[in-house]
Amino acid sequence: MAIPDSDKNADRFVSWREFLTSAYVPSLALVCLAVWLHAADGLIVATMLPSIVSEVGGAALVGWSVSLYEIASVVAGAASALLTMRHGLRRPMSLAAALFGLGCLLSALSPSMALILVGRCLQGLGGGGLVAMAFVAVGVVFPARYTARAIALVSTFWGVSAFLGPLIGGFFVEYATWRWGFGFFALQAFGLSAWIALRPDHSAVQTKETGKFPLRRLALLCLAVLLVSSGGIEVKPLQSTLLIAMGLVCLVQFLRLDGRAGADRLLPNHPFGLSTTTGAALLMILSLSIATIALTAFGPLLVITIHGVSALTAGYVIACSSVGWSFAAVLVSGSPERFDRHMIMAGITMVVLSIAGFIHAVPQGPVWLVAVFATLDGAGFGLAWTFILRRTTSLAEPGEVQRISGAMPTVQRLGYALGAAYIGIVANATGFVSMNTTQAAAEVATWVFLACLPFGLLALVAMSRLVRNQPASAKASA
């Protein structure tokens, strides 16, 4: 069972020594390994893809190796909260790790790109489930006073993967084979599955209901993300707009059906409505994900084309975002609960300011200024993200904690899919495909980051709703 905090314990500074010597260290290790598998896998596969294509072919399917992983991750993440509410954390999380391992093993043994894509689907299901259930574990198993520290370490592992992922993938390509890269992750996943299966389940099962599994809603969500992702893979303004519009219709229908499902809901009530604190938090996460994906999706290529730097330099300029995120998260994670709203306001404001900064810095330079805004972007996320889960769950009904915790990474991935497709249309409509001069690339960069700004402003509106109310513990200490 989760151990409730007294008001006194929940609102005091927590040192790293106290946290890392607590009884929750084994649970923390499981959570961090789960996040590592999901975060590092995509970067390693991206590094290995050229070697994979040269051996098994299927160059035309390369885009789907990423998209199918993301689609499966979103669907698995959406189902995770309901699974943990029905069965606890141990069995669903062990199964997710096993699915991830099976997908890696299938990819390692595949003779064709088609089978690798099947493996990527299984990896997406397992990885998406693992990271969503990791957030559920942080929200349910850890006391509130430890939540920010746990999220800070999760953020650090995510940032470390940004550096180690490509290095590990490159190591296997250079000194062994890409198949061993998949095998390396399969061993970790199967080990994690066994470790979880052998541990007692300390999560509280909120409901004993065992109704039908919501396959119809999950299929509708899968179709929605598939259509949106299809619009972003081969971007043609008319075709992509139509596919994204159809995807949004499916997404709205999914939300409508899920809202009527009662205890079998996959997401919290009114997940994107400003009328509730939870809805405001998830709308803020969705908006920020849409607004910031341009840096990852188009930033490296635009920086290389406009400023003439090497691919390695551009990669590490963008990676400054991960460094800023990890550093800020670790720095402020001991902050007591009464400061949560201030941290969130400061962090989200920093992210939106960084978006405005990219509008100038990417097309005009210098490159170090792009790195500064990338660091500001990451630091803002690290500052806010560490406290969003704690604040949102403190204001929610107890029965919604698992749904909220699982929804955060799922909504983030959904936002990335929507944002990639949206920014892809903007980029192509402003001449991305045909740009052949530095000036043309600079104009594309201006429009791409300018198109992100409205979603950043929407995130500020949602943030104002999230920080408006005070949790009970904060009121008690006032």
Image (cartoon, rainbow, N blue to C red):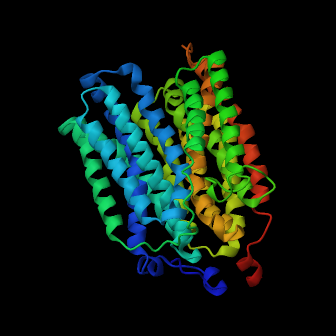
Q: Position of residue 352 (x, y in %)?
A: 69, 46
Residue at the image position 69 percent from the left and 27 percent from the top? 245
Asked if residue 292 can be seen in this view, the reply is no
Seen in the picture, residue 74 relative to 477 is either above or below; the reply is: above
Asked if residue 29 can be seen in this view, the reply is yes
Q: Position of residue 118 (x, y in %)?
A: 37, 34
Residue at the image position 52 percent from the left and 50 percent from the top? 77
The quadrant holding residue 55 is top left
Which image quadrant: the C terminus? bottom right
Q: Position of residue 211 (x, y in %)?
A: 57, 56
Residue at the image position 74 percent from the left and 54 percent from the top? 280
Q: Position of residue 379 (x, y in %)?
A: 58, 55
Seen in the picture, residue 42 relative to 67 is either above or below; the reply is: below
Seen in the picture, residue 218 relative to 139 is either above or below; the reply is: above
Residue at the image position 50 percent from the left and 41 percent from the top? 318
> In this view of the protein, which residue sits in the foreground, 141 or 11?
141
